[in-house]
Image (cartoon, helix red, strand yellow):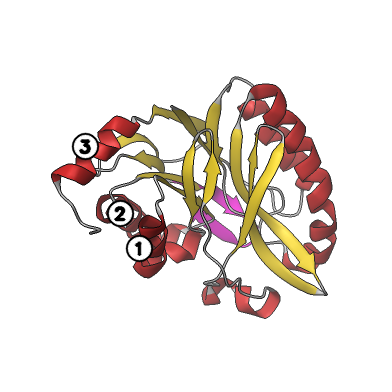
Amino acid sequence: MKAAVIQLQIDEGKSINNLQKLITLLADLEDHLVVVPEMFACGFHYEGMREHARETWEILHTLLDLTKRKSITFVGTLPEEEDGKLYNTAFVLSEGVLVGKRRKSKLFPLYKEPAYFQPGDSNPLFETRHGILGVLICFELRFPQLGWELRRKGAQIICVPSMWGLARKDHLRILSRARAIELQSYLLLANAWGVSGDEEYAGSSAIFGPWGEILAFAEVGDTVLKANLDMAHLEKVRKTLPLFL
């Protein structure tokens, strides 16, 4: 099964520019699972976040059409507004269908997320032709219990849309690989890189195997990482060293 991670420098508040750049990077992908960074369209442009949330469904319709034409499963986060409350929401689209969504439950205090967003309260799986997916959003990598819950439910692949800061780059690299190892799952980390707004982001996007193998890695730059995910290998790892009995 083919998988791809897209690493982007996000131009804060410039949804049209970011979406066009993303679509260009998606152009050569067919029949892939694709993970993109957190808040890939607007970044953490708090002053305009409600306006960006009103753009979300238009962006999703564009991506739904793309996923249908190219047989893609797509995972990324956008701002969502419901009943006057804002959420940082991961949307899972697959081959023209909105499979489901998950709202970020662990909000990052250093970037003022709790002042603008409400936390989500669910941790579902998403069953697609490209695997059984769980989603952890950026800061949530620091909370292993969220990953354990997904693994016990049957997750095969952990998708991690992220805007992780450069100052904590070493943490990102260690935690993402550790989650893959302890969950015996493929892990697809899509992080932003470079300056966006007032922050600089770490890049270091990667695809890890269930034994902790580094299947693909990018330090910086707008790029597409690709790897083949072998579910027979995943099952072999889990049978060789049973951790979730």
Magenta segment, prevailing SS (helix, strand or loop)? strand
The residue to which callout 3 is attached is 236
Left or right: 165 with respect to 69? left
Q: Quadrant of the C terminus?
A: bottom left
Locate residue 231, reporting x and y percent: 34, 33
Query: Residues under labels 3 and 2: Cα distance?
Result: 14 Å
Region rendered in magenta: 191-203
The reply to whether residue 175 is visible in this rendering is yes
Residue type indicated by callout 3: Lys
Locate residue 227, reporting x and y percent: 40, 28
Q: Residue at x 73, y 67 (%)?
A: 46
Query: Residues under labels 1 and 2: Cα distance?
Result: 7 Å
Residue type indicated by callout 1: Trp
The residue to which callout 1 is attached is 148
Q: Residue at x 59, y 36 (%)?
A: 73
Query: Residues under labels 1 and 3: Cα distance?
Result: 19 Å
Given contact means CB atoms under 8 Å apart, are the residues at marks 1 and 2 in contact?
A: yes
